Amino acid sequence: MGGMCDEEITAGSKDEMLAKGMEHVEAAHPEMAESIKKMSPADPLMVDWQKKFDASYEAAPEK
Ligand SMILES: [Zn+2]
């Protein structure tokens, strides 16, 4: 999801996709999950990631 890795995640909505993506990160990339949790949603890195996620979701909503 969002270029984090090659895992294909399908979901019916953007929120579901985010939740599933986070579950996958926690299961498969625990160290990445840790650093995400330490970051504030207002962190420029997170804001940038969110923008890319929105753009790629709009481009391929079924993924
Ligand atoms: Zn992954």
Image: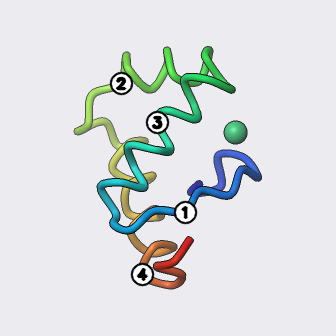
* Crowding at mark 4 (Cα within 10 Å: few <14, some 14-19, many 20+): few
Q: Marks 2 and 4, Cα distance to the nearest angstrom?
A: 25 Å
Of pointers 1 and 4, the one earlier in the residue sequence: 1
The residue indicated by pointer 4 is 58
Decide: marks 2, 4 in contact (CB < 8 A)? no
Decide: marks 1, 4 in contact (CB < 8 A)? no
Of pointers 3 and 4, the one earlier in the residue sequence: 3
Q: What element carries label 3?
A: helix
Q: Which amino acid does label 3 sit on?
A: Met
- Residue 23: image location, x then y, percent: 49, 32
The residue indicated by pointer 2 is 39
Decide: marks 3, 2 in contact (CB < 8 A)? no
Q: Marks 3 and 2, Cα distance to the nearest angstrom?
A: 14 Å
* Crowding at mark 2 (Cα within 10 Å: few <14, some 14-19, many 20+): few
**Looking at the rendering, which quadrant does residue 26 occupy?**
top right
Q: Marks 1 and 2, Cα distance to the nearest angstrom?
A: 25 Å
Q: Which of marks 2 and 4 is in front?
A: 4
**Looking at the rendering, which quadrant does residue 38 occupy?**
top left
**Residue 22 vertical placement versus 62 (above, below):** above
Residue at the (33%, 66%) spot, across then down: 13
The residue at the far left in this view is 42
- Residue 17: image location, x then y, percent: 42, 55
Decide: marks 3, 1 in contact (CB < 8 A)? no
Counting the numbered discs, the total is 4
Q: What element carries label 1?
A: loop
Disc number placed over residue 10 in the picture, else none? 1
Q: Which amino acid does label 2 sit on?
A: Met
The residue indicated by pointer 3 is 22
Q: Nearer the viewer, mark 3 or mark 2?
A: 3
